[in-house]
Amino acid sequence: MTISHVTTHILDTATGKPAADVPVSLLVLDDGAWSHLASARTDSDGRVKDLGPAVLETGTYRLQFATAEYFAASNTPSFFPEVVLTFNVDRGEPHYHVPLLLSPFSFSSYRGS
């Protein structure tokens, strides 16, 4: 399996477990508008390793996580129906890992390795 230029994983910090089966989309900012590049769902370990091409052009990208569906599946009330993370990619960098730490009423992220 080829690993994408951008990968992600989600940890549900309220339960201390990976967030499985969460829809994730990768978008690119192109001439002032967002264009869809790829979609996937997190695996049983909360990870997406195959999301879009192996190499992205330099630019601004967005990961969109459909968190409402995830929380609804466990009957958990939540505040954020989706989480959107916007970040810059430099084609010269070999890999970007963008994790999401998630709970029903907060989230955070960082550039992982």
Image: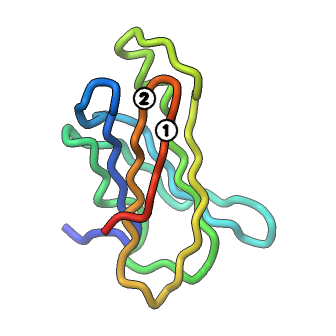
Q: Residues within 10 Å of mark 2 (few under 14, many from 20)?
A: some
Q: Residue at x 49, y 86 (%)?
A: 91
- State if disc 1 and disc 2 touch (CB < 8 Å): yes
Pick out the residue farthest to the bottom.
Answer: 92
Give the distance between the C-alpha atoms of the residues marked 2 and 1, in whole angstroms.
6 Å
The C terminus lies in quadrant: bottom left
Q: Position of residue 20 (x, y in %)?
A: 28, 34
Q: Which residue is mark 2?
A: 103
Give above or below for 108 relative to 93: above
**Element assignment for label 2:** strand
Q: What amino acid does circle 1 point to?
A: Phe
Pick out the residue farthest to the right.
Answer: 32
Q: Position of residue 85 (x, y in %)?
A: 57, 53
Q: Residue at x 58, y 65 (%)?
A: 87
- Comparing 21 with 95, the one in front is 95
Q: Which residue is mark 1?
A: 107
Res 35 → quadrant: bottom right
Q: Residue at x 27, y 69 (%)?
A: 3
Q: What amino acid does circle 2 point to?
A: Ser
- Residue 59 lies left or right of residue 70; in this view the side is right
Q: Residues within 10 Å of mark 1 (few under 14, many from 20)?
A: some
Give above or below for 19 relative to 97: above
